[in-house]
Amino acid sequence: MDEEMLIPEEEYQKSGVHIGTQVKSSDMKPYIFKIRNDGLYILDVKKTNSKLIVAGKMLARFEPQDILVVAQRQYAFRPVAKFAEVTGATAITGRFNPGTLTNPSLKFYKEVKVIIVTDPLADVQAMKEAVKIGIPIIALCDANNKTDFVDLIIPTNNKGRRSLAVIYWLLAREILKNRGTITSYDQFKYTIDDFEAQI
């Protein structure tokens, strides 16, 4: 039986979640649906959907303050900040200061138990530190990403404004549902627009 789609497949596509890059890493091969005539690799949104379901269940088991979400990419700043506000997670956008996870003597030190990275390529410092302290890593991975050290891959366009909003909106909604904070999706009062970066 097909897994329930969190939003209709067309919505994923309309938001550009499926639009990959012109470069494909071997790591991401299982998540590629096809290659377009213009050379863009297209991601399989059914796999995006199922990974979001898994991530929502996994993250709901953590205390909100134990979840860290990071993003270097500007279009991710608002989705990440909104995600943190809605779920109670901690967000770091922009530069990730070395030692944030590894040096308790620093004033910006954070002690967390799981990390979400928006792009393993851009968020490499956060990835390195998460690996060093041995916490699980959930990563939004595009067609070109290497996935070494990623514990849970969410295959998605991790560069687009709308796609980032959709992914973080869905993830926040799934976490709240799995926590029992909301009992139905109707009770989730935020819209995708609330999560989308302004131009």
Image: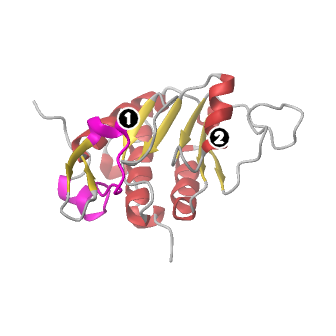
Q: Nearer the viewer, mark 2 or mark 1?
A: 1
Q: Residue furthest bottom?
A: 199
Residue at left 67%, top 42%?
125
Q: Which mark is residue 126?
A: 2
Note whether residue 89 is visible. no
Q: Residue furthest top?
A: 134
Circle 1 residue: 27
- Kindly identify the amino acid type of the residue bearing the numbered disc 1: Asp
Note whether residue 97 is visible. yes
- Kindly identify the amino acid type of the residue bearing the numbered disc 2: Ala
The location of residue 89, given as percent across then percent down, is: 60, 42
Q: Residue furthest right?
A: 105
Magenta span includes 64: no
Q: Is residue 133 left or right of residue 122?
A: right
Q: Quadrant of residue 104?
A: top right
The location of residue 144, given as percent across then percent down, is: 40, 48
Query: Which of the pair 50/122 is nearer the observer?
Result: 122
Q: Give the extent of the magenta segment.
A: 9-31
Q: Residue furthest left?
A: 1
| Mark 1 element type | helix
Q: Which mark is residue 47?
A: none
On screen, residue 137 above or below 22:
above
Q: Pick the quarter of the image with the N terminus.
A: top left
Residue at left 31%, top 51%?
186
First-in-chain label (2 vs 1) = 1
Residue at left 23%, top 65%?
38
| Mark 2 element type | helix
